[in-house]
Image (cartoon, rainbow, N blue to C red):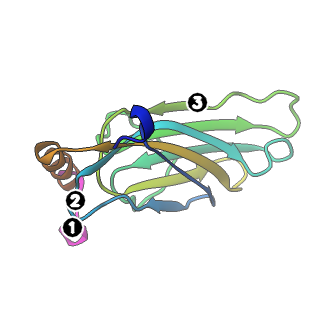
Amino acid sequence: MECYEGATMIKTFRGLLADGAQDTIVLHTNDGATGYRIVKFQIIGTQPSSVNSESTLKIYKVSQTAITDTIDLSDNTLLAVAYRESYAASSSNEPEIIIFDREIFNQDIYITHENTESGVGCNYYIELEQVKLDLSESTVATLKDIRNVTDPVTIV
């Protein structure tokens, strides 16, 4: 979708995820003519300078039944992953590692968080570029998303 003078529409989402939790970002529409792609994904701990933390956040195309810190980039339902370490006793912390796919999707996305160090929550910030899809692009994106659903009961 176009904004003023050809600029693209960017939608932002942010939240705080507890350890072992999942958030849903509702994006689906009745006609599937609006697509999205990730343009920015950032994370920061709730207390980055005072709590030891090793957070893994992942964005999926399908809801996850098990939240883990295992990263499998061959998983075709995985859209993005972010990892960040911070240690209270250290004067310097490692920078976050972010990897995301430029794939266009038109259904809801799911963000998971696993903290293997302290069990505290982690904040996320996501920017999605909104893309107008023609009928064939919409059909392809929707079919790809439906194919990723393994439980036929969840298809709506």
Viewer-proximal residue, 106 or 31? 31
Residues at marks 3 and 2, CA–CA distance in whole angstroms: 29 Å
Tell me whether the residue at label 2 lies in contact with that at label 1, contact meaning CB atoms closer than 8 angstroms: no
Give the residue type at disc 2. Answer: Thr
Helix, strand or loop under label 1: loop
First of labels 2, 1 by sequence position = 2
Name the foreground residue: 27 vs 10: 10
Q: Is residue 154 magenta?
A: yes
Identify the element where label 2 is drawn: loop
| Amino acid type assigned to the residue bearing label 3 in the image | Ile
Q: Which residue corresponds to mark 1?
A: 155
Residue 146 image position (x, y, % from top left):
19, 56
Tell me the kind of residue under disc 1.
Ile
Q: N-terminal of the two: label 1 or label 3?
A: 3
What residue is disc 2 on? Answer: 150
Residue 68 point in image, percent of width and height = 49, 51
Judged left or right of residue 47, residue 44 is left
